[in-house]
Amino acid sequence: MTQKRMPAALLLGLASVVPAHGLDDSIIRQLDRLTPEERREQRCDIEAMNRISREIKSFRPDKVIAYTFGDPVEKGNQLKAPGAVFRSDGDWYRLKFKCETAEDGLKVLSFDYKVGSKIPRERWNEFYLYE
């Protein structure tokens, strides 16, 4: 498990401003500043939040971390994140997803996910989770 990654401040609130149908110009500019790997991961994180909030009405995700329980695996334009988590209404939940983007990392071509169990609050520190 690693806890290194891109500057959290850069894209921390991105999903709250992402329309369900696509990315606005300011988000695209922010994503363009990232390496291709970081861009793909962030774009897939945004897609996870959009899909979960649209398809599972009981969740309102505001943050996804792709690497909490294990590093994502990137192969070409595909990203598999078997150890991801997301936060909804102040609680953290396990998440697995597989995401394929276009070459530029901005357009999501395919996305599959599975929501897992709620992570007990007493374990948050162990996995660097926060309120």
Image: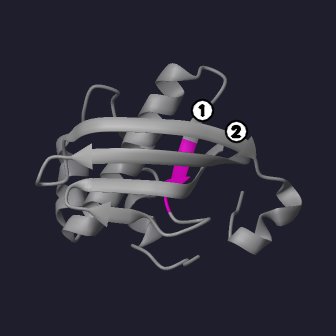
* SS at circle 2: loop
Q: Relative to 72, does residue 3 appear above or below in the rendering?
A: below
Among all residues in the image, which is located at the extreme right? 122
Along the viewing direction, whichever of 92 and 82 lies nearer the viewer: 82
Residue at coordinates 20% horizontally, 66% vertically from top-left?
Answer: 36
Amino acid tagged 2: Asp
Q: Which residue is mark 2?
A: 89
Q: Are marks 1 and 2 in contact (CB under 8 Å)?
A: yes
Q: Which residue is mark 1?
A: 60
* SS at circle 1: loop
44 left or right of 81 in image? left
Task: Give residue 59's position: percent from left, percent from top.
Answer: 63, 30
Q: Quadrant of the N terminus?
A: bottom right
Residue at coordinates 54% horizontally, 50% vertically from top-left?
Answer: 63
Q: What is the span of residues highlighted in magenta in the rendered image?
A: 62-66
Amino acid tagged 1: Arg
Distance, label 1 to label 2, CA atoms, is 6 Å
Asked if residue 69 can be seen in this view, the reply is yes
The first of marks 1 and 2 along the sequence is 1
